[in-house]
Amino acid sequence: MHRPRSLLPLVPLLLVMASAACERKQSVTTGGDSAAAARATRDQVLLGVVASLTGDQASFGVSTRDGVLLAVEEANARGGALGKPIQMRVYDSQGKPSEGANAVTRLISQDGATVILGEVASSISLAMAPVAQRAGVPMISPSSTNPKVTQVGDYVFRVCFIDPFQGYVMARFAGEHLGARRAAILRDNKSDYSIGLSTVFTARYPEFGGTVVSSEAYSQGDTDFRSQLTAIKATRPDVIYVPGYYTDVGLIARQARQLGIDVPLLGGDGWESTKLYELGGPALDGNYFSNHYSPEDPRPVVKDFIARFTQRFGRQPDSLAVLGYDAANVAIAAIQRTGTTQGAQVREAISRTRDFPGVGGTITLDPERNATKPAVVLKIQDGSASFVTSVEP
Amino acid sequence: MSVFLQHLINGLAAGTIYALVALGYTMVYGVLKLINFAHGDVMMVGAYVGYATAFSLAPHVRTSSLGVLLVILVAMAACAAFGFLMERFAYRPLRDKPRLTSLITAIGISFALSYGFQLDVGPLPGAAPRAFPEIIVLRPWLKIGDVVLWNAQVISFGIAIALMAGLQWLVYRTRFGRAMRAVSHDHRIAGLMGIPTDRVIGLTFMLGSALAAVAGILYAVKDTAITPLMGLYVGLKAFVAAVIGGIGNVPGAVVGALLLGLVEEFVVGYTASSWRDAVAFGFLILVLLFKPEGLFGKNAAEKV
């Protein structure tokens, strides 16, 4: 017979679970005292940042946060905005749409954020946007490229181009530059981003003389793509369009090469991460992806930014850091132009952003609140990506 | 034809991993009538232990056969110890409670592991996927047309088959196996007959967890990356495989797993990719409807 035992041995496990469930919070206050940051006052200038600091896409979130942080520090060194230091608060979305939406609610109702900056993944931005729109607080997504994001309402902006454009860039690049006539598509069926890019690629590719010969799908987090790749190989494509995230793309590249597929893989800005090279290794050589910026861009504004970022964080900025930096600067400039922190007026000022000299290209916001700017195509060789060409809208 | 052959190879490779994990499910279910939902996560732990071990070895040692053996043995030992602790502290205290209690505990352990490993504190690895070192340097083993059979696939398959044969021998040809089968029949009566049930159950957990560790490493070698969430999905599929084969039945789990791997592969290869999971779970429902004891399970008459 067993005597009843205590559940004490389970306590450590429960603690691990509880801490995993808790949202990680991080507060950065530059130039102001943290007690003031804790009080949500109406006239503070607070940039609320939502980023995936943990989860599959953690490298996206960390880069974005650092880009915003650099912009805020630089603005504060110039005297802040409206005569006050600009504050910044970061919440972790853990790569989950529901956490992203919760974070926006907290930033607005509890912290009194002036502008919301975030997210990278379109599916998370899509969950956040309605919250910001309802509360009448402007939101700028640095790098969500799905068109639906800014269609949520007139308070939602972005400083990057949209999916149709990236799909178009790669369709054009494949047809005109590579002379590829047959393309296969391998998309992530769980991501709005991946579906968006592949839909536009499929629609525009015929304009450049190509045909989509097969279209396969996987789900984010899969690690075995051999079945799809074997089916794709049988259709003998000239290129394979894989508009997914780096976590999956690295494995797809390795498995494709193992199966004897030696045609180039093409992708979008979801490939951008140093993790991609760790996961994909030499299998990535000879593949291409479209992106927001290239560090090899000779413009002085890019060179200066790279120098400052590298000095501050001890590593090269990726394009997500650039877009985070640009998004924060667009927000700060708008607040300064309007002279208040009122949501409606700040929104109005952001919407009038014209020819703003961003690091990732000159930003003009169109009436749909999207940025019009060129994209670059990069080629991967020996663990780094180099500039091939730039495609204008 | 070459496409068919390639699908066959892919399917068998996936099925082998499912089989090693399914064996753990089936053994634990056999002795305790408990579905240990944390089993897939034990596989994940094994993969991470293998990862750490491989990185602590010099690159030329790690790729030697001795190095590979060491990586596998360390992971097996770590997971066996973990399996023992899990049984001792999480399941044994609940053994005489309603079965639902243990089941919920199992789900709790599963989540604690897969989300705990995503934390970035101390030795925990953090959420981002890790590239598993290439411990078996890839070389083509056999070429048929443009289909390549890689050495890693052959080695993995060999290791898995050897372990399954060993297990079969252990269960049906040794004293320990006989004790295990007795406990499986009725652990209270087995206890009255002088069988040390606690030790047998503990050893069963250790054995199942060690097999899961091997599965974790073979999985990592095959798909080249590991993440804290990898166990949830493979665990679920292996559970389906064990039920299809007849849960509690060792050869059944292996056949069920290979069958599931092949079915999934051919569904993706010859229809749309999105059908894979629908067909896998549809297959499970069909088996449960028409042969609820599984393909190989015995319909044991219960004495009332």
Image (spheres, grey):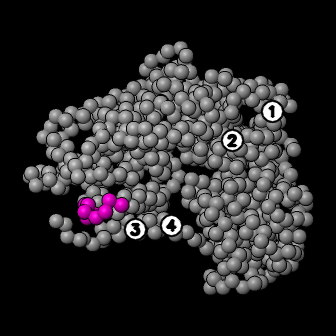
Q: Is residue A236 above or below residue B296?
A: above
The reply to whether residue B210 is in sight is no
Q: Residue at x 58, y 56 (%)?
A: A58
Magenta segment boundaries in residue numbering: B92-100
As measured in the structure, the alpha-carbon distance from the residue carrying label 2 to the one carrying label 3 is: 39 Å
Q: Position of residue B160 (x, y in %)?
A: 34, 33
Name the amino acid, label 4: Ala
Q: Which residue is mark 3?
A: A14
| Chain for disc number 4 | A
Q: Position of residue B4 (x, y in %)?
A: 53, 21
As measured in the structure, the alpha-carbon distance from the residue carrying label 3 to the one carrying label 1 is: 52 Å
Secondary structure beneath label 3: helix
Q: Nearer the viewer, residue A308 or B201?
A: B201
Label drawn at residue A21: 4
> What is the quadrant of the N terminus of chain A in the image?
bottom left
If you read the primary sequence from the N terminus, does the residue marked by circle 4 or circle 1 appear first?
4
Secondary structure beneath label 1: helix
Say few, some or many: other residues with alpha carbon within 10 Å of mark 2 (under 14 / 14 to 19 / 20 or more): many
If you read the primary sequence from the N terminus, does the residue marked by circle 2 or circle 3 appear first?
3
Q: Is residue B103 above or below residue B149?
A: below
Tell whether position B97 is magenta. yes
If you read the primary sequence from the N terminus, does the residue marked by circle 2 or circle 1 appear first?
1
Q: Residue at x 47, y 30 (%)?
A: B262
Do the dots labelled 2 and 4 sit on one chain? yes
| Chain for disc number 3 | A
Q: Is residue B2 above or below residue A72?
A: above
Q: Which residue is mark 2?
A: A243
Name the amino acid, label 1: Tyr
Are the residues tagged 3 and 4 within 8 Å (C-beta)?
Answer: no
B276 relative to B196 in the view: left or right: right
> What is the quadrant of the C terminus of chain A in the image?
top right
